[in-house]
Image (cartoon, helix red, strand yellow):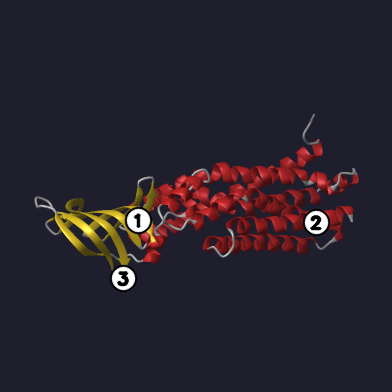
Amino acid sequence: MHLMSRIQTYILKECLSGLALVLGLLVLAILMIDVVEQLRTVGGDVSLSLLSALRLSLMKLPLLIEQTLPFALLAACMLAFTRLNRRSELSIIRASGLSAWRFLTPVIVLASGVGLVSSLILNPFAARLTQSFEYERSRLIQIGQETLAVADTGIWLRQGDDTSQIVIHARRVEDSGRTLLDVKLIEEQRLYEGRRPTSDFAFVRRIDAERAVLNDGFWQLENLVENLPNLPAKRRNTLAIPTSLNAATLLDKFASPNSIGFWDLPGFIHETRAAGLDASRYTMRWYVLTATPVLFVAMALIGALACLRLQRLGATSRLLATGVLAAVGLYFLTQFSASLGATGAVPPPVAAWSPPLFFLFVSLAFIAYREDG
């Protein structure tokens, strides 16, 4: 028994060919634009060859494809149904007695499948390459003096400048990153050959502190032990360590939600909360990814419905423009709702699922009105 009729299979193939064409054009456009962007940004700080810029762009490409995939699906469905309309195949399909519910089924199946692949396969792959891109870009422009990471062993922070750097480890964090508990600091100094700086660093001191509080321009260490080379350990009640960080930049240096894959997000959210940091952005990202198939179905139906009107009846351009505007509205509403969810103004599940479900139900209601009266 066939899951889909020949007509439905034919429509599915048309949509797939349209998606392949649109994705091919998008990949070429993205690569050309992003290579120029890498040459302009990274190449403005260091000498960057065209091959290195292309390598950076290829690392970033899966993330950009993931972000533009909803619009690619929209354009693919518009292209497929425009072809069917121009060749009068849509009129023949309707004349054969096939309802819109049935010939739109391939669109729903395709959008659901692409949405699942995007969330479960493409997103983890893009997240891993995004981490490599950020690391490689930072290495090339020699930025990386101030970074933050959460691991099973606690918080790792690195700060510094051209002459020195300090690696900070803390077991826990309080007050949204302002206070570190059970802190260890290792300070290193850059080595010079004459007046020329090298890429090597020499150990200066290690500090073990009970607490480190981030103030304006310095860390205030409390109940600490300072270890210097070839000298006995010194106990101090307080010590100030200069820093260029503040609470806002400290959180901004936290791992980007885009650099964490779908399968790793639940564990990362748990570790972030256990470390005392706010995990709202990552929770919101996870719910957005779970709602991706619904978003894709809504986008695909909008694109298909905009092209269902027979060309001889006119007003096709107006419907196409309406469909594009509706899709753009859905995208921006989704982004706005995600921002509200990330700040805690709206519960993350509501913020992630409401916009795509609303547009999906509107599309289904439109089909029911047109087909069933």
Q: Mark 3 or mark 2: name the one nearer the start of the chain.
A: 3
Q: Horizontal placement of 128 versus 143: left or right? A: right
* Residue 143 can be seen in this image: no
Residue 368 x, y percent position in the rendering:
84, 54
Q: In front: 327, or 174?
A: 174
Q: Amino acid at mark 3?
A: Asp
Cα distance in 3D space between marks 1 and 3: 18 Å
Is disc 1 surrounded by few (<14), some (14 to 19) or many (20+) residues within 10 Å? some
Label 2 amino acid? Answer: Ala
Q: Which mark is residue 147?
A: 1
Number of other residues with Cα within 10 Å of mark 2, as a class: few under 14, some 14 to 19, many 20 or more: few
Element under disc 1: strand
Spot the residue most to the bottom: 216
Nearest the eye: 264 or 72: 264
Q: Is residue 262 left or right of residue 330?
A: left
Residue 16, quarter of picture: top right
Query: Where, quadrant-wise, is the N terminus in this rendering?
Result: top right
Label 1 and label 2: CA atoms lie apart by 49 Å
User: In x, y percent, where is residue 167?
Assistant: 27, 53
Q: Is residue 81 visible?
A: yes
Residue at image position (52%, 43%) is 263
Q: CA distance from mark 3 to mark 2?
A: 56 Å
State the residue position of label 2.
365
Q: Secondary structure at mark 3?
A: loop
Residue that badge 3 annotates: 216
Residue drawn at 90 percent across, 46 percent down: 95
Callout 1 touching callout 3 (CB < 8 Å): no
The quadrant holding residue 205 is bottom left
Which of the marked residues, 1 or 2, is nearer the chain's N terminus? 1
Image coordinates of residue 206 in percent, x first then y, are 20, 53
Figure check: 238 above or below 206? below
